[in-house]
Image (tube, rainbow, N blue to C red):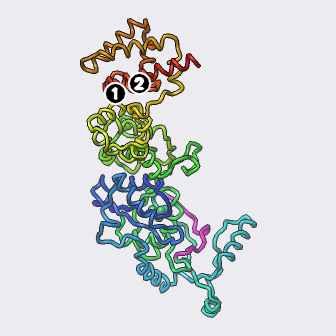
């Protein structure tokens, strides 16, 4: 490994940041941090029809949220900028001139329709569809005729008919036969550089030492190697990692469910959990460790860990990790992170007594899997949201339930002392008076106090509700039983 590797993440802002791309960013970021190198962010926005500023803004925001901060890139100037391809068009134009002068490229006047026709003909004759070089040997007169017809040329690279070979740090030697590759476009007819052209120039000029990206780019790398040779540039080291797969082992895509960082964010996943999960996916750490902080992953990082076989995305595992990270937060931090989710569920934390609310959050913290779950866990603490669920009604319907909650309530009316003492004594009283035991004692009390059959430990709930609220709720449950008996 070179002394200070320079790696890059080069997303195209054509959609939400996919977790697969986030994982590529993570590998690059870890490589840079592990070796004390630089992590460069480059925005590949030359496809004007598909790129959007809003995607770019979200992309930067998601990367920051994940903690994948860049040393050079948008908003962080360095010696190799600009870092947006749309701001580098002059550089690409100069490089095109060099290849034209060396007679390594030629203008191609074929229209979309003509190219499609050629493709179909090749498919029909069971040959590999590729550009067959129709415009390669046009003479200057023929070119002028096309130009006079108003055809704008694209520029194609003259693919040498020799095999291409390169070393991949994860996969070893990779070979491609030159004959199967047609002359490819490096500059489009609208003057914009094609991906393979711009990426070679940028990786070279930005002094990138390692290109780490998904295996879906392997065939691009073959084309890029040709361009490195054509320019006389030293290529960087390449590593193509496996992709994230869905349960059916097809590349993870929307039809498998959530796939973007933004979606997981909205669903209340913590960045720590998502990063941990993406770092874990398809690899293993010593001692079978599964919960690792970003820094621990950086320390343990090696490229070989980005295994060769595809990694199946398991949302259940991510949920499991998320719950662990939620449990490990201190209450104030958790409340801060919960804020947007609380608002979304109709709670206004600022209007609540902060100590009381902190108690509420601490009481439910261990039960949360995602931050978005919060509403359904805390509603039972709010009198105006108290509601007896149908499961709970079944409990209240059982024999003796009324006796239990009445005797529990009876005790409360006149009780004094700490909430802990009151609760314990009221339970004792209800037990004696009703003869109820175990489940038959606790469940009626639980559903009367919370309206639900499940929830945090009852003594804790009781302490937060307080005596007055508890009494009101017991009465409402009692009224429901009464009405139900009448009905
Ligand atoms: N803009 C390309 C993409 O998003 C970058 C691929 C690469 O890393 O070279 O797929």
- The percent coordinates of residue 401 (x first, y second) are 47, 14
Q: Is residue 178 above or below residue 413?
A: below
Query: Tag 1, which secondary structure?
Result: helix
Query: Tag 2, which secondary structure?
Result: helix
> Which residue is under mark 1?
465
Mark 2 or mark 1, which is nearer to you?
2
Q: Nearer the viewer, residue 314 or 134?
A: 314
Q: Which residues are magenta?
A: 174-186
Q: Which mark is residue 473?
A: 2
Contact (Cβ within 8 Å) of mark 2 with mark 1: yes
Q: Quadrant of the C terminus?
A: top right
Q: Is residue 418 above or below residue 68?
A: above
Residue 85, can we see it? yes
Taking the spot 41% from the left edge, 38% from the top edge, the residue there is: 374
Q: Give the spatial CA distance, label 2 vs label 1.
A: 10 Å
- The percent coordinates of residue 23 (x first, y second) are 43, 52
Residue 172, can we see it? no
Figure quadrant of residue 292: top left
Q: Is residue 252 above or below residue 355?
A: below
Number of marks drawn: 2
Q: Nearer the viewer, residue 352 or 118?
A: 352
In reply to whether residue 354 is colored magenta, the answer given is no
């Amino acid at each position: 490994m070179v002394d200070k590797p320079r790696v890059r993440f080069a997303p195209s802002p054509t959609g939400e940041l996919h977790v697969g791309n986030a994982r590529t960013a993570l590998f690059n970021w870890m490589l840079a941090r592990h070796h004390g190198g630089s992590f460069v962010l480059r925005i590949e926005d030359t496809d004007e029809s598909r790129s959007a500023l809003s995607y770019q803004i979200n992309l930067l925001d998601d990367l920051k949220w994940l903690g994948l901060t860049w040393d050079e890139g948008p908003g962080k100037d360095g010696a190799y900028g600009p870092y947006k391809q749309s701001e580098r068009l002059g550089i690409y134009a100069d490089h095109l001139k060099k290849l034209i002068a060396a007679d390594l490229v030629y203008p191609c006047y074929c229209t979309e329709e003509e190219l499609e026709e050629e493709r179909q003909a090749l498919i029909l004759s069971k040959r590999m569809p590729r550009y067959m070089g129709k415009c390669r040997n046009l003479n200057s007169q023929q070119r002028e005729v096309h130009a006079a017809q108003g055809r704008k040329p694209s520029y194609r690279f003259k693919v040498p008919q020799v095999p291409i070979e390169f070393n991949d740090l994860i996969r070893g030697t990779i070979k491609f036969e030159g004959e199967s590759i047609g002359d490819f476009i490096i500059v489009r007819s609208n003057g914009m550089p094609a991906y393979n052209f711009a990426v070679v120039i940028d990786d070279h000029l930005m002094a990138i030492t390692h290109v780490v990206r998904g295996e879906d780019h392997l065939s691009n790398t073959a084309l890029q190697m040709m361009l490195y040779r054509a320019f006389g540039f030293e290529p960087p080291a390449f590593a193509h990692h496996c992709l994230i797969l869905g349960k059916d082992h097809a590349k993870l895509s929307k039809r498998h469910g959530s796939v973007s960082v933004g979606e997981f964010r909205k669903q209340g996943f913590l960045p720590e959990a998502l990063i941990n999960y993406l770092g874990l996916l398809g690899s293993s750490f010593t001692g079978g460790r599964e919960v690792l902080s970003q820094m621990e992953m950086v320390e343990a990082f090696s490229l070989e860990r980005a295994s060769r076989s595809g990694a199946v995305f398991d949302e259940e595992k991510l949920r499991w990790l998320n719950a662990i990270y939620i449990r490990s937060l201190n209450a104030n931090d958790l409340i801060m992170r919960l804020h947007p989710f609380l608002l979304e569920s109709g709670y206004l934390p600022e209007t609540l007594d902060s100590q009381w609310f902190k108690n509420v959050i601490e009481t439910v913290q261990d039960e949360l899997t995602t931050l978005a779950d919060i509403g359904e866990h805390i509603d039972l603490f709010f009198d105006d949201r108290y509601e007896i669920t149908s499961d709970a009604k079944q409990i209240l319907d059982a024999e003796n339930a009324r006796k239990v909650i009445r005797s529990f309530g009876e005790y409360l009316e006149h009780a004094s002392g700490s909430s802990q003492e009151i609760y314990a004594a009221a339970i004792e009283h209800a037990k004696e008076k009703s003869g109820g035991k175990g489940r038959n004692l606790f469940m009626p009390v639980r559903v009367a106090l919370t309206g639900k059959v499940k929830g945090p430990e009852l003594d804790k709930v009781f302490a937060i509700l307080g005596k007055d609220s508890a009494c009101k709720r017991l009465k409402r449950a009692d009224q429901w039983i009464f009405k139900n008996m009448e009905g």
